[in-house]
Image (spheres, helix red, strand yellow):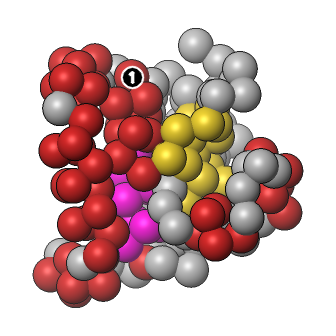
């Protein structure tokens, strides 16, 4: 599988933390993080207005397909080792997946506080071939 772009809100602590978790899971390095505030996001999502871009996370596949909000969940999961079974469940119940995504999106600030507000770092890839380095600073 070639690398797909995972677009997230770089100004949102919960979003950076969540993207970091996905990147750590992504041992095959199939996802490439791109903050929605990065100029590259505008290029990848050229058919969307800024409001549409900022309304949710997105996955842009190597083939150029774009998935947003709940529809991105099964597609992102398919990029991860062991993600096919939960991807199939998310795809089987698209309305429930979209509702769950929207619930998390609406309550991301509260959820971030509930998990203890780990110090988020921008999702990144290390140059040594290791997993992503994003997530909470455990110092």
Q: Quadrant of the N terminus?
A: top right
Q: Quadrant of the C terminus?
A: bottom left
Q: Is residue 121 magenta?
A: no
Vertical relation: 118 (above or below) 76: below
Q: Residue at x 71, y 20 (%)?
A: 63
* Span colored in magenta: 14-22
Q: Is residue 65 left or right of residue 43?
A: left
Pointer 1 local density, CA inside 10 Å: few below 14, some 14–19, many at least 20: some
Image spot of residue 83 (x, y percent)? 28, 24
Task: Name which quarter of the figure residue 122 lies in.
Answer: bottom right
User: Which residue is tagged 1?
Assistant: 78
Q: Is residue 40 left or right of residue 60?
A: right
Q: Evaluate whether residue 78 shows in this view.
A: yes
Q: Residue at x 56, y 27 (%)?
A: 30
**In front of the other: 7 or 46:** 46
Q: Residue at x 22, y 85 (%)?
A: 110
Image spot of residue 111 (x, y percent)? 21, 77
Image spot of residue 89 (x, y percent)? 17, 26
Q: Evaluate whether residue 41 shows in this view.
A: no
**In front of the other: 16 or 133:** 16
Q: Is residue 13 left or right of residue 88?
A: right
Image spot of residue 102 (x, y percent)? 29, 62
**In front of the other: 132 or 110:** 110
């Amino acid at each position: 599988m070639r690398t797909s772009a995972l677009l997230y809100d770089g100004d949102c602590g919960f979003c950076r933390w969540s993207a970091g978790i996905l990147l750590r899971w992504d041992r095959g390095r199939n996802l490439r993080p791109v903050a929605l505030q990065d100029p590259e996001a505008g290029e990848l999502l050229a058919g969307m207005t800024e409001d549409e871009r900022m309304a949710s996370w997105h996955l842009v596949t190597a083939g150029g397909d774009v998935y947003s909000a709940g529809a991105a969940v099964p597609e992102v999961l398919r990029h991860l080792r062991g993600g096919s079974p939960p991807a199939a469940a998310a795809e089987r119940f698209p309305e429930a997946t979209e509702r769950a995504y929207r619930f998390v999106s609406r309550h991301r600030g509260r959820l971030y506080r509930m998990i203890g507000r780990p110090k988020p770092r921008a999702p990144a890839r290390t140059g040594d071939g290791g997993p992503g380095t994003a997530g909470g600073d455990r110092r």
